[in-house]
Amino acid sequence: MMPVVAIVGRPNVGKSTLFNWLIRRDRAIVGPEIGITRDRIYGKWHVDKDFIVDLVDTGGFDILKGSSITQSILLQTLQAIHDADVILCMLDAASGPTPDDASLVDTLRRSGSQVIYLANKVDDNTTSLKVGAFYELGIDNIVEISARNKKGLPEIITALKKYVHPPMVHGQMNEEEAYGIRVTILGRPNVGKSLLLNRIVGEPRSIVSPEPGTTRDCVDTRITKSGRDYVFVDTAGVRRKSRIDSEIEKTGVIRSIRNIERSHVCLYLIDAIEGITEQDKRLIGLVTDRGRAMLIAVNKCDLIPLAQEGNLREEIRYRLRFIPDVGIMCISALTGRNIDKIYPMIDDFFNKTTARIPTPRLNRIIADIVEASPPPAYKGRRIKFYYVTQVDISPPRFKIFTNYPEAISPSYTRYIAANIKKICQMEGIPVAVQFARRIRRGRTKGSR
């Protein structure tokens, strides 16, 4: 397990700016509006060579009683404090200490956590002079930084290494080793994505609210089940473009779509009451276009008669006839019905989409497929398939070398792909087949 470092602080002190700077990606949404970050956001911070930590961005620590969402954000922050090995507590040097700062410092002191205090927005000597006011909160040492101008990183690392040391990390790890099977939960707003994530994890990991657009960032949750590691990603609900009127929501939607490409498996939720909509079809099309393995989960099935489920599945399958072998299951995130069946299906899809077929077997398979139904002749000439190789996984991609690649029709390409899926037991996942001209080696000098 990598050490966990959480960034906490009151609203708008620069936590997400620091988070993005440390992980070297625009992972968390940044803006002047208070309360943009709501759930805990995870990322990898490569502190230096062979030293990686799990970095957590949190919502603002606000002790004033507000909406249910405000209270949920506070609970998420408190959970992050409990789970972390080290806390980076951010303070706003430009505005000075506030009652929220005092309450947070007291909370951290009582938690017994290892804390590094950071005075942010120290962009000039005038602001640096204001840092002294924070020592009145009983803080022993404060690191002065500017997340916006990327100042103070060496000091942060020096302070961090007092509590967490590189030997705790098991060398360099690739993303799959560090994170496991990546599953992105997708769907329209209020379809139950966050509730499903909480049900899968077994704790209130994402904020759940009847208010549309509660989830804004993509929330990573890492868990281990039966010895296998998973990363579940709760995403912002995607509405039609005409209904997206907030820049923050637009950013969240873009990141939801980008997460599709980073996933091994996508779990797409459909509302059992509303059924499949045109927007659902468009989003599912995005998943298939990007070659991701996908499971359709029809949520809120506790609200419809059991006898209606069969008709609902048939309707969805008919509307999604462009992916006839897609997996469909009926669930209830509220009651937990069929949730235990999600893991085996994810494992099955992951094994299929990452499978590698040996080249000799592939060539035998293609020979049998072509023998059963050869491609039509091209300009009176027979099309020959010389050999095939698998060039990629997630999705599995196969390249077939032939004498006339331009002559292969889309229908025959689909025929090849469908038979590869059937013979190799890859049903339910996208398979890509492409054709290329065989490159013949020229004769060497003196050859006959």
Image (spheres, rainbow, N blue to C red):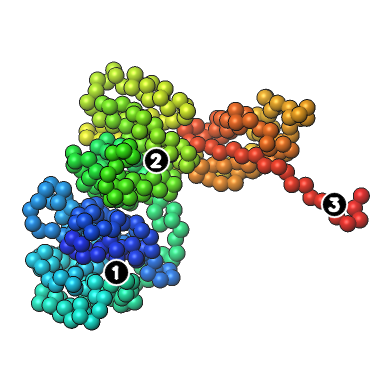
Answer with left or right where residue 147 lies relative to residue 117. right
Q: Position of residue 172 (x, y in %)?
A: 45, 64
For badge 2, the amino acid type reads Cys
Can residue 298 be spotted in the picture? yes
Q: Which disc is residue 266 wearing?
A: 2
Query: Is label 3 in a helix, a strand or a loop?
Result: loop
Sequence-wise first label, 2 or 1: 1
Sequence-wise first label, 2 or 3: 2
Answer with left or right where residue 425 lies relative to residue 447. left
Q: Mark 2 or 1, which is nearer the eye?
A: 1
Query: Is label 2 in a helix, a strand or a loop?
Result: strand
Q: Which disc is residue 191 wearing?
A: none
Residue 119: quarter of image: bottom left
Instruction: Look at the picture and state if 166 lies above or below 431.
Output: below
Q: Position of residue 442 (x, y in %)?
A: 82, 51
For badge 1, the amino acid type reads Ala
Looking at the image, which residue is at 73% across and 29% down?
378
Query: Is label 1 in a helix, a strand or a loop?
Result: loop
Q: Mark 1 or 3, which is nearer the eye?
A: 1
| Neighbourhood count class around disc 2 (C-alpha, 10 Å): few under 14, some 14–19, many 20 upward | many
Looking at the image, which residue is at 23% across and 71% down?
120
Looking at the image, which residue is at 10% across and 77% down?
136
Can residue 109 be spotted in the picture? no
Q: Position of residue 28 (x, y in %)?
A: 31, 56
CA distance separating discs 2 and 3: 49 Å
| Neighbourhood count class around disc 3 (C-alpha, 10 Å): few under 14, some 14–19, many 20 upward | few
Residue beneath disc 3:
443
CA distance separating discs 1 and 3: 62 Å
Answer with left or right where residue 363 lies relative to residue 320. right
Residue beneath disc 1:
147
Q: Position of residue 435 (x, y in %)?
A: 65, 39
Looking at the image, which residue is at 16% across and 55% down?
74
